[in-house]
Amino acid sequence: MSTNYEAVIGLEVHAQLLTRTKMFCGCSIAYGAPPNTQVCPVCLGLPGALPVPNRQAIELAMRAALSLGCTVRTFSRFARKNYFYPDLAKGYQISQFELPLNEHGHLEITTSTGTKTAGITRIHVEEDAAKNLHGIGAGTDTLVDFNRAGTALIEIVGEPDLRSSEEAEQYLKALRDVLMFAGVNDGNLEEGSFRCDANVSIRPVGSETFGTRVEIKNINSFRFVRKAIDFELARQEALVSAGGKVVMETRTWSDPQGQTLSMRSKEQAHDYRYFADPDLPPLVIDAPWLARIAGTLPEALPARRARWQAALGLTAYDASVLTSHPAIAAWFEETVAATAKLTGKSDAELGKKVANFVQAEVLRETTTSGLEAQFPVPSDRVAGLLALVEDGTINGKIAKDVFADMVKTGKSAKQIVDGKGLAQVTDTAAIEAVVRGVVQANLKEVEKYRAGKTSVKGFFVGQIMKATRGTANAAIVNELLDKVLGEA
Protein backbone atom coordinates (compact mmCIF):
# COMPACT_ATOMS: atom_id res chain seq x y z
CA MET A 1 0.00 0.00 0.00
CA SER A 2 1.03 3.61 -0.53
CA THR A 3 1.62 5.97 2.38
CA ASN A 4 -1.69 7.71 1.63
CA TYR A 5 -3.90 4.96 3.02
CA GLU A 6 -4.02 2.81 6.11
CA ALA A 7 -5.29 -0.76 6.32
CA VAL A 8 -7.99 -1.66 8.82
CA ILE A 9 -8.32 -5.40 9.35
CA GLY A 10 -10.38 -7.48 11.75
CA LEU A 11 -10.49 -11.28 11.77
CA GLU A 12 -13.34 -13.61 12.65
CA VAL A 13 -11.99 -17.07 13.46
CA HIS A 14 -14.06 -20.24 13.65
CA ALA A 15 -12.36 -22.87 15.80
CA GLN A 16 -13.81 -26.36 16.15
CA LEU A 17 -13.91 -27.47 19.77
CA LEU A 18 -12.22 -30.74 20.73
CA THR A 19 -15.37 -32.54 21.80
CA ARG A 20 -16.18 -36.16 21.07
CA THR A 21 -19.72 -35.36 19.98
CA LYS A 22 -21.64 -32.50 18.40
CA MET A 23 -22.85 -29.34 20.10
CA PHE A 24 -26.47 -30.32 20.68
CA CYS A 25 -26.64 -34.08 20.06
CA GLY A 26 -24.65 -37.26 20.60
CA CYS A 27 -23.42 -37.77 17.02
CA SER A 28 -19.72 -38.38 16.49
CA ILE A 29 -17.54 -35.69 14.91
CA ALA A 30 -14.90 -38.12 13.58
CA TYR A 31 -13.36 -36.63 10.43
CA GLY A 32 -13.53 -38.48 7.12
CA ALA A 33 -16.57 -40.71 7.71
CA PRO A 34 -18.76 -41.56 4.69
CA PRO A 35 -21.24 -38.74 3.91
CA ASN A 36 -24.37 -38.48 6.05
CA THR A 37 -23.45 -41.34 8.40
CA GLN A 38 -22.88 -39.21 11.53
CA VAL A 39 -26.34 -37.71 11.75
CA CYS A 40 -29.52 -37.89 13.82
CA PRO A 41 -32.89 -36.09 13.97
CA VAL A 42 -31.35 -33.22 15.97
CA CYS A 43 -28.53 -32.31 13.58
CA LEU A 44 -30.78 -32.97 10.58
CA GLY A 45 -33.30 -30.49 11.97
CA LEU A 46 -36.22 -32.91 11.89
CA PRO A 47 -39.51 -31.71 13.44
CA GLY A 48 -39.83 -32.33 17.17
CA ALA A 49 -36.11 -32.99 17.78
CA LEU A 50 -34.79 -31.04 20.78
CA PRO A 51 -31.19 -29.86 21.29
CA VAL A 52 -29.23 -30.52 24.50
CA PRO A 53 -26.05 -28.43 25.08
CA ASN A 54 -22.72 -30.24 25.20
CA ARG A 55 -21.16 -29.51 28.62
CA GLN A 56 -17.65 -30.28 27.38
CA ALA A 57 -18.05 -27.70 24.61
CA ILE A 58 -19.08 -25.03 27.12
CA GLU A 59 -16.04 -25.81 29.27
CA LEU A 60 -13.69 -25.68 26.29
CA ALA A 61 -15.15 -22.32 25.28
CA MET A 62 -14.49 -21.08 28.81
CA ARG A 63 -10.88 -22.34 28.62
CA ALA A 64 -10.40 -20.42 25.39
CA ALA A 65 -11.84 -17.28 26.93
CA LEU A 66 -9.70 -17.42 30.06
CA SER A 67 -6.58 -18.12 27.97
CA LEU A 68 -7.30 -14.97 25.93
CA GLY A 69 -8.08 -12.69 28.86
CA CYS A 70 -11.83 -12.59 28.26
CA THR A 71 -14.54 -12.09 30.83
CA VAL A 72 -16.82 -15.13 31.10
CA ARG A 73 -20.44 -14.12 31.55
CA THR A 74 -22.30 -15.73 34.43
CA PHE A 75 -25.48 -15.48 32.34
CA SER A 76 -25.57 -15.99 28.57
CA ARG A 77 -28.10 -17.20 26.05
CA PHE A 78 -28.33 -19.20 22.84
CA ALA A 79 -30.06 -17.52 19.90
CA ARG A 80 -31.39 -18.56 16.53
CA LYS A 81 -29.65 -16.97 13.55
CA ASN A 82 -32.21 -17.24 10.76
CA TYR A 83 -31.23 -17.59 7.12
CA PHE A 84 -31.83 -20.00 4.26
CA TYR A 85 -29.05 -22.02 2.66
CA PRO A 86 -28.93 -25.69 1.60
CA ASP A 87 -26.37 -26.56 4.31
CA LEU A 88 -28.72 -25.40 7.09
CA ALA A 89 -31.46 -27.99 7.49
CA LYS A 90 -33.38 -26.15 10.22
CA GLY A 91 -33.41 -22.82 8.40
CA TYR A 92 -31.52 -21.31 11.32
CA GLN A 93 -28.21 -21.77 13.11
CA ILE A 94 -28.01 -22.02 16.89
CA SER A 95 -25.51 -19.36 17.91
CA GLN A 96 -25.25 -16.50 20.41
CA PHE A 97 -25.98 -12.84 19.83
CA GLU A 98 -26.66 -10.13 22.41
CA LEU A 99 -25.54 -12.26 25.37
CA PRO A 100 -22.41 -14.20 24.29
CA LEU A 101 -20.56 -16.44 26.72
CA ASN A 102 -17.26 -14.49 26.59
CA GLU A 103 -16.29 -10.87 25.93
CA HIS A 104 -13.43 -8.35 25.91
CA GLY A 105 -10.17 -10.25 25.53
CA HIS A 106 -6.81 -9.58 23.93
CA LEU A 107 -3.97 -11.30 22.09
CA GLU A 108 -0.32 -10.27 21.97
CA ILE A 109 1.39 -10.62 18.58
CA THR A 110 4.96 -10.09 17.41
CA THR A 111 5.84 -8.87 13.93
CA SER A 112 8.94 -7.56 12.18
CA THR A 113 8.14 -4.10 13.56
CA GLY A 114 7.67 -5.13 17.18
CA THR A 115 5.01 -6.34 19.60
CA LYS A 116 1.42 -5.15 19.83
CA THR A 117 -1.81 -6.15 21.54
CA ALA A 118 -4.91 -6.78 19.44
CA GLY A 119 -8.34 -6.70 21.03
CA ILE A 120 -10.94 -9.48 20.99
CA THR A 121 -14.56 -8.35 20.99
CA ARG A 122 -16.21 -11.63 21.92
CA ILE A 123 -16.00 -15.41 21.81
CA HIS A 124 -19.35 -17.08 21.35
CA VAL A 125 -20.46 -20.68 21.02
CA GLU A 126 -22.35 -22.01 18.02
CA GLU A 127 -22.96 -25.03 15.81
CA ASP A 128 -21.37 -25.58 12.41
CA ALA A 129 -23.34 -25.91 9.19
CA ALA A 130 -23.26 -28.90 6.84
CA LYS A 131 -20.90 -29.09 3.87
CA ASN A 132 -22.01 -28.39 0.31
CA LEU A 133 -20.32 -30.57 -2.32
CA HIS A 134 -20.40 -28.86 -5.71
CA GLY A 135 -19.87 -30.34 -9.17
CA ILE A 136 -21.15 -33.81 -8.34
CA GLY A 137 -22.30 -36.25 -11.03
CA ALA A 138 -22.47 -34.56 -14.43
CA GLY A 139 -20.67 -31.57 -12.97
CA THR A 140 -23.68 -29.39 -12.20
CA ASP A 141 -25.19 -31.04 -9.12
CA THR A 142 -24.65 -29.94 -5.53
CA LEU A 143 -25.05 -32.47 -2.72
CA VAL A 144 -24.98 -31.84 1.02
CA ASP A 145 -23.03 -33.84 3.61
CA PHE A 146 -24.55 -33.31 7.08
CA ASN A 147 -21.76 -35.06 9.01
CA ARG A 148 -20.32 -31.67 9.96
CA ALA A 149 -23.71 -30.12 10.81
CA GLY A 150 -23.97 -29.40 14.51
CA THR A 151 -20.23 -29.61 15.25
CA ALA A 152 -19.33 -27.43 18.23
CA LEU A 153 -17.54 -24.19 17.33
CA ILE A 154 -16.39 -21.00 18.94
CA GLU A 155 -16.28 -17.83 16.88
CA ILE A 156 -13.54 -15.46 17.99
CA VAL A 157 -14.38 -11.95 16.78
CA GLY A 158 -11.33 -9.69 16.74
CA GLU A 159 -11.31 -5.92 16.99
CA PRO A 160 -10.30 -4.02 13.80
CA ASP A 161 -6.85 -3.43 15.31
CA LEU A 162 -4.67 -5.02 12.62
CA ARG A 163 -2.88 -2.77 10.14
CA SER A 164 -1.13 -5.14 7.74
CA SER A 165 -1.33 -8.62 6.29
CA GLU A 166 1.73 -9.54 8.37
CA GLU A 167 -0.10 -8.58 11.56
CA ALA A 168 -3.11 -10.63 10.43
CA GLU A 169 -0.93 -13.69 9.77
CA GLN A 170 0.84 -13.39 13.13
CA TYR A 171 -2.50 -12.88 14.89
CA LEU A 172 -3.78 -16.15 13.43
CA LYS A 173 -0.59 -18.03 14.34
CA ALA A 174 -0.61 -16.69 17.90
CA LEU A 175 -4.32 -17.46 18.32
CA ARG A 176 -3.86 -20.98 16.99
CA ASP A 177 -0.99 -21.56 19.45
CA VAL A 178 -3.06 -20.35 22.41
CA LEU A 179 -6.03 -22.56 21.52
CA MET A 180 -3.87 -25.63 20.92
CA PHE A 181 -1.92 -25.26 24.18
CA ALA A 182 -5.19 -24.78 26.04
CA GLY A 183 -6.46 -28.06 24.56
CA VAL A 184 -9.38 -26.30 22.89
CA ASN A 185 -8.67 -26.80 19.18
CA ASP A 186 -6.36 -29.03 17.11
CA GLY A 187 -5.24 -26.20 14.82
CA ASN A 188 -5.81 -28.24 11.68
CA LEU A 189 -6.31 -25.76 8.87
CA GLU A 190 -6.34 -28.46 6.19
CA GLU A 191 -9.40 -30.17 7.69
CA GLY A 192 -11.13 -26.85 8.31
CA SER A 193 -11.17 -27.06 12.10
CA PHE A 194 -9.44 -23.65 12.26
CA ARG A 195 -10.52 -21.16 9.60
CA CYS A 196 -11.03 -17.44 9.34
CA ASP A 197 -12.91 -14.66 7.62
CA ALA A 198 -11.07 -11.36 7.13
CA ASN A 199 -12.84 -8.00 7.19
CA VAL A 200 -10.67 -5.61 5.17
CA SER A 201 -10.99 -1.89 4.50
CA ILE A 202 -8.79 1.14 3.89
CA ARG A 203 -8.95 4.74 5.06
CA PRO A 204 -6.83 7.86 4.50
CA VAL A 205 -3.89 8.05 6.88
CA GLY A 206 -4.89 10.08 9.93
CA SER A 207 -8.62 9.44 9.52
CA GLU A 208 -10.56 7.93 12.41
CA THR A 209 -13.50 6.95 10.20
CA PHE A 210 -13.65 3.38 8.97
CA GLY A 211 -13.94 2.75 5.25
CA THR A 212 -16.35 0.34 3.60
CA ARG A 213 -15.30 -3.16 4.54
CA VAL A 214 -15.15 -6.27 2.41
CA GLU A 215 -15.38 -9.72 3.96
CA ILE A 216 -13.09 -12.45 2.61
CA LYS A 217 -14.60 -15.82 3.56
CA ASN A 218 -13.15 -19.12 4.73
CA ILE A 219 -9.41 -18.64 4.31
CA ASN A 220 -7.71 -21.85 5.39
CA SER A 221 -3.97 -21.18 5.41
CA PHE A 222 -1.67 -18.55 6.88
CA ARG A 223 -0.09 -17.94 3.49
CA PHE A 224 -3.45 -17.43 1.81
CA VAL A 225 -4.54 -14.97 4.52
CA ARG A 226 -1.56 -12.80 3.80
CA LYS A 227 -1.92 -13.02 0.02
CA ALA A 228 -5.68 -12.43 0.08
CA ILE A 229 -5.40 -9.36 2.30
CA ASP A 230 -2.53 -7.87 0.28
CA PHE A 231 -4.49 -8.30 -2.93
CA GLU A 232 -7.66 -6.85 -1.44
CA LEU A 233 -5.87 -3.81 0.00
CA ALA A 234 -4.27 -3.10 -3.39
CA ARG A 235 -7.60 -3.60 -5.16
CA GLN A 236 -9.42 -1.20 -2.86
CA GLU A 237 -6.69 1.46 -3.07
CA ALA A 238 -6.64 1.31 -6.87
CA LEU A 239 -10.43 1.58 -6.95
CA VAL A 240 -10.58 4.57 -4.59
CA SER A 241 -7.62 6.31 -6.24
CA ALA A 242 -9.44 6.09 -9.60
CA GLY A 243 -12.50 7.79 -8.14
CA GLY A 244 -14.52 4.65 -7.55
CA LYS A 245 -16.21 3.37 -4.40
CA VAL A 246 -15.62 0.16 -2.48
CA VAL A 247 -18.82 -1.90 -2.34
CA MET A 248 -19.67 -3.84 0.80
CA GLU A 249 -19.58 -7.46 -0.31
CA THR A 250 -18.41 -10.96 0.46
CA ARG A 251 -15.43 -12.22 -1.53
CA THR A 252 -13.36 -15.39 -1.63
CA TRP A 253 -9.68 -16.00 -2.30
CA SER A 254 -8.68 -17.89 -5.45
CA ASP A 255 -5.07 -18.91 -5.19
CA PRO A 256 -4.81 -20.19 -8.81
CA GLN A 257 -5.97 -16.78 -10.03
CA GLY A 258 -4.08 -14.86 -7.35
CA GLN A 259 -7.03 -12.65 -6.51
CA THR A 260 -10.17 -12.25 -4.45
CA LEU A 261 -13.43 -12.92 -6.30
CA SER A 262 -16.87 -11.52 -5.56
CA MET A 263 -19.36 -13.99 -4.07
CA ARG A 264 -22.36 -11.87 -3.11
CA SER A 265 -23.27 -8.28 -2.34
CA LYS A 266 -23.75 -7.10 1.24
CA GLU A 267 -24.80 -3.52 0.51
CA GLN A 268 -27.81 -4.07 2.72
CA ALA A 269 -27.01 -5.47 6.14
CA HIS A 270 -28.44 -8.97 6.38
CA ASP A 271 -31.31 -9.25 8.84
CA TYR A 272 -30.81 -12.57 10.58
CA ARG A 273 -33.82 -11.93 12.86
CA TYR A 274 -31.97 -13.16 15.94
CA PHE A 275 -34.14 -14.23 18.84
CA ALA A 276 -33.58 -16.37 21.94
CA ASP A 277 -33.85 -20.07 21.17
CA PRO A 278 -37.04 -21.25 22.92
CA ASP A 279 -35.72 -24.83 23.15
CA LEU A 280 -32.64 -23.88 25.17
CA PRO A 281 -32.63 -22.31 28.64
CA PRO A 282 -30.15 -19.54 29.55
CA LEU A 283 -26.62 -20.70 30.25
CA VAL A 284 -25.64 -19.96 33.87
CA ILE A 285 -21.98 -20.22 34.92
CA ASP A 286 -21.47 -20.24 38.69
CA ALA A 287 -18.25 -19.22 40.45
CA PRO A 288 -17.13 -22.74 41.48
CA TRP A 289 -17.49 -24.01 37.91
CA LEU A 290 -15.48 -21.10 36.49
CA ALA A 291 -12.81 -21.47 39.20
CA ARG A 292 -12.43 -25.17 38.44
CA ILE A 293 -11.88 -24.45 34.73
CA ALA A 294 -9.40 -21.67 35.52
CA GLY A 295 -7.46 -24.07 37.76
CA THR A 296 -6.91 -26.52 34.91
CA LEU A 297 -5.35 -24.05 32.48
CA PRO A 298 -1.75 -24.67 31.44
CA GLU A 299 1.02 -22.11 31.84
CA ALA A 300 0.47 -19.26 29.39
CA LEU A 301 2.72 -19.40 26.33
CA PRO A 302 4.44 -16.02 26.87
CA ALA A 303 5.14 -17.00 30.47
CA ARG A 304 6.53 -20.39 29.48
CA ARG A 305 8.82 -18.88 26.85
CA ALA A 306 10.06 -16.26 29.32
CA ARG A 307 10.68 -18.94 31.97
CA TRP A 308 12.68 -21.09 29.58
CA GLN A 309 14.82 -18.14 28.60
CA ALA A 310 15.46 -17.15 32.20
CA ALA A 311 15.81 -20.60 33.79
CA LEU A 312 17.21 -22.73 30.97
CA GLY A 313 19.31 -20.22 29.06
CA LEU A 314 17.32 -20.55 25.83
CA THR A 315 17.19 -17.78 23.26
CA ALA A 316 13.88 -16.25 22.21
CA TYR A 317 14.20 -18.21 18.95
CA ASP A 318 14.78 -21.50 20.82
CA ALA A 319 11.73 -20.90 23.00
CA SER A 320 9.60 -20.06 19.97
CA VAL A 321 10.60 -23.20 18.05
CA LEU A 322 10.14 -25.51 21.02
CA THR A 323 6.67 -24.12 21.74
CA SER A 324 5.57 -24.52 18.12
CA HIS A 325 3.39 -27.44 19.22
CA PRO A 326 2.07 -28.54 22.65
CA ALA A 327 3.46 -32.07 22.34
CA ILE A 328 6.91 -30.77 21.36
CA ALA A 329 6.99 -28.41 24.35
CA ALA A 330 6.00 -31.20 26.74
CA TRP A 331 8.53 -33.62 25.17
CA PHE A 332 11.34 -31.07 25.50
CA GLU A 333 10.64 -30.50 29.19
CA GLU A 334 10.51 -34.26 29.78
CA THR A 335 13.90 -34.65 28.10
CA VAL A 336 15.51 -31.91 30.17
CA ALA A 337 14.16 -33.43 33.40
CA ALA A 338 15.24 -36.97 32.44
CA THR A 339 18.75 -35.81 31.46
CA ALA A 340 19.09 -33.92 34.74
CA LYS A 341 18.07 -37.04 36.68
CA LEU A 342 20.64 -39.21 34.86
CA THR A 343 23.53 -36.76 35.13
CA GLY A 344 22.87 -35.11 38.48
CA LYS A 345 23.18 -31.72 36.76
CA SER A 346 20.66 -28.89 36.97
CA ASP A 347 18.07 -27.95 34.37
CA ALA A 348 19.91 -24.64 33.97
CA GLU A 349 23.14 -26.43 33.03
CA LEU A 350 21.43 -28.70 30.53
CA GLY A 351 18.59 -26.63 29.03
CA LYS A 352 20.45 -25.00 26.18
CA LYS A 353 22.35 -28.18 25.30
CA VAL A 354 19.13 -30.20 25.13
CA ALA A 355 17.42 -27.45 23.13
CA ASN A 356 20.23 -27.38 20.57
CA PHE A 357 20.17 -31.16 20.10
CA VAL A 358 16.39 -31.36 19.86
CA GLN A 359 16.22 -28.60 17.25
CA ALA A 360 19.13 -29.90 15.18
CA GLU A 361 18.42 -33.64 15.30
CA VAL A 362 15.04 -34.57 16.77
CA LEU A 363 12.60 -32.11 15.20
CA ARG A 364 13.56 -32.94 11.62
CA GLU A 365 12.41 -36.52 12.32
CA THR A 366 9.24 -35.45 14.17
CA THR A 367 5.76 -35.26 12.65
CA THR A 368 2.63 -33.66 14.10
CA SER A 369 -1.06 -34.22 13.49
CA GLY A 370 -3.58 -32.20 15.41
CA LEU A 371 -2.49 -32.18 19.04
CA GLU A 372 -0.48 -35.38 18.63
CA ALA A 373 3.19 -35.68 17.69
CA GLN A 374 5.23 -38.68 16.60
CA PHE A 375 8.82 -38.54 17.89
CA PRO A 376 11.55 -40.72 16.37
CA VAL A 377 12.92 -41.71 19.81
CA PRO A 378 11.30 -41.53 23.29
CA SER A 379 12.41 -38.65 25.51
CA ASP A 380 14.04 -40.94 28.10
CA ARG A 381 16.23 -42.53 25.42
CA VAL A 382 17.36 -39.16 24.09
CA ALA A 383 18.16 -38.26 27.71
CA GLY A 384 20.27 -41.41 27.92
CA LEU A 385 22.18 -40.35 24.82
CA LEU A 386 22.80 -36.84 26.10
CA ALA A 387 23.93 -38.23 29.45
CA LEU A 388 26.69 -40.12 27.62
CA VAL A 389 27.85 -36.81 26.14
CA GLU A 390 27.76 -35.12 29.53
CA ASP A 391 29.87 -37.78 31.25
CA GLY A 392 32.42 -37.77 28.42
CA THR A 393 31.66 -41.27 27.12
CA ILE A 394 31.07 -39.86 23.62
CA ASN A 395 31.44 -36.45 22.03
CA GLY A 396 28.78 -34.33 20.32
CA LYS A 397 29.67 -35.44 16.81
CA ILE A 398 29.39 -39.11 17.66
CA ALA A 399 26.12 -38.39 19.49
CA LYS A 400 24.58 -37.33 16.18
CA ASP A 401 25.66 -40.58 14.51
CA VAL A 402 24.39 -42.61 17.46
CA PHE A 403 21.04 -40.84 17.32
CA ALA A 404 20.68 -41.72 13.63
CA ASP A 405 21.30 -45.37 14.55
CA MET A 406 18.77 -45.14 17.38
CA VAL A 407 16.13 -43.95 14.90
CA LYS A 408 16.92 -46.80 12.48
CA THR A 409 17.35 -49.66 14.94
CA GLY A 410 15.31 -48.72 18.01
CA LYS A 411 18.31 -49.57 20.20
CA SER A 412 19.40 -47.49 23.18
CA ALA A 413 22.38 -45.17 22.94
CA LYS A 414 24.45 -47.36 25.28
CA GLN A 415 23.76 -50.49 23.23
CA ILE A 416 24.97 -48.74 20.08
CA VAL A 417 28.03 -47.14 21.71
CA ASP A 418 29.11 -50.44 23.32
CA GLY A 419 28.31 -52.50 20.24
CA LYS A 420 30.31 -50.27 17.89
CA GLY A 421 33.08 -49.39 20.30
CA LEU A 422 32.35 -45.66 20.07
CA ALA A 423 33.26 -44.68 23.61
CA GLN A 424 35.81 -41.88 23.78
CA VAL A 425 39.42 -42.92 24.17
CA THR A 426 41.01 -41.12 27.11
CA ASP A 427 44.12 -43.29 27.39
CA THR A 428 46.88 -40.70 26.96
CA ALA A 429 49.49 -43.20 25.83
CA ALA A 430 47.20 -44.69 23.17
CA ILE A 431 46.24 -41.27 21.82
CA GLU A 432 49.87 -40.10 21.80
CA ALA A 433 50.84 -43.10 19.67
CA VAL A 434 48.22 -42.11 17.10
CA VAL A 435 49.32 -38.46 17.20
CA ARG A 436 52.96 -39.36 16.58
CA GLY A 437 51.96 -41.69 13.76
CA VAL A 438 49.93 -38.99 11.99
CA VAL A 439 52.68 -36.39 12.44
CA GLN A 440 55.34 -38.77 11.16
CA ALA A 441 53.23 -39.54 8.08
CA ASN A 442 52.81 -35.86 7.20
CA LEU A 443 56.24 -34.28 7.59
CA LYS A 444 55.63 -31.67 4.86
CA GLU A 445 52.66 -30.38 6.85
CA VAL A 446 54.85 -30.33 9.96
CA GLU A 447 57.31 -28.06 8.16
CA LYS A 448 54.48 -25.68 7.19
CA TYR A 449 53.29 -25.56 10.80
CA ARG A 450 56.76 -24.84 12.15
CA ALA A 451 57.21 -22.17 9.47
CA GLY A 452 54.27 -20.29 11.01
CA LYS A 453 51.24 -21.68 9.17
CA THR A 454 49.39 -22.64 12.38
CA SER A 455 46.13 -23.31 10.53
CA VAL A 456 47.67 -26.64 9.51
CA LYS A 457 46.94 -27.84 13.02
CA GLY A 458 43.32 -28.39 11.99
CA PHE A 459 44.51 -30.83 9.34
CA PHE A 460 46.33 -32.90 11.95
CA VAL A 461 43.34 -32.91 14.30
CA GLY A 462 41.14 -34.15 11.46
CA GLN A 463 43.55 -36.95 10.58
CA ILE A 464 43.85 -38.04 14.21
CA MET A 465 40.07 -38.10 14.69
CA LYS A 466 39.71 -40.03 11.45
CA ALA A 467 42.27 -42.58 12.64
CA THR A 468 40.40 -43.02 15.93
CA ARG A 469 36.93 -42.97 14.28
CA GLY A 470 36.21 -39.81 16.22
CA THR A 471 36.57 -41.53 19.58
CA ALA A 472 39.69 -39.74 20.81
CA ASN A 473 39.09 -37.14 23.50
CA ALA A 474 39.44 -33.80 21.72
CA ALA A 475 41.06 -31.97 24.62
CA ILE A 476 43.71 -34.67 25.01
CA VAL A 477 44.33 -34.71 21.24
CA ASN A 478 44.96 -30.96 21.15
CA GLU A 479 47.25 -31.08 24.17
CA LEU A 480 49.37 -33.93 22.83
CA LEU A 481 49.45 -32.49 19.30
CA ASP A 482 50.87 -29.22 20.65
CA LYS A 483 53.48 -31.21 22.53
CA VAL A 484 54.54 -33.32 19.54
CA LEU A 485 54.58 -30.44 17.04
CA GLY A 486 56.61 -28.38 19.45
CA GLU A 487 59.37 -30.96 19.72
CA ALA A 488 62.59 -30.12 17.83
Image (cartoon, grey):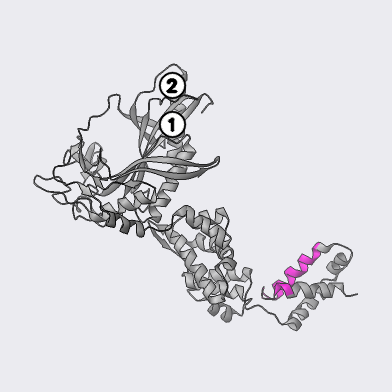
Q: CA distance from mark 2 to mark 1?
A: 16 Å
Left or right of residue 414, residue 227 in this image: left
- Assess disc 2: are there few (<14), some (14-19) or many (≥20) residues with their C-alpha within 10 Å of its C-alpha: few
Q: Is residue 114 magenta?
A: no
> What residue sits right under mark 1 in the picture?
8
- Assess disc 1: are there few (<14), some (14-19) or many (≥20) residues with their C-alpha within 10 Å of its C-alpha: many
- In terms of secondary structure, what is the magenta stretch mainly? helix
> What residue sits right under mark 2 in the picture?
239
Residue kind at label 2, given as amino acid type: Leu
Measuring from the top left, give residue 381's x and y in whole percent: 49, 73
Of residue 453 and residue 354, the one placed in the foreground of this image is 354
Of residue 4 and residue 210, the one placed in the foreground of this image is 210
Residue 438 visible to the viewer: no
Magenta span of residues: 455-475
Residue located 55% across and 78% down the image: 414
Q: Residue furthest front?
A: 287
Of residue 177 and residue 293, the one placed in the foreground of this image is 293
Q: Where the C terminus falls, by quadrant?
A: bottom right
Give SS at disc 1: strand
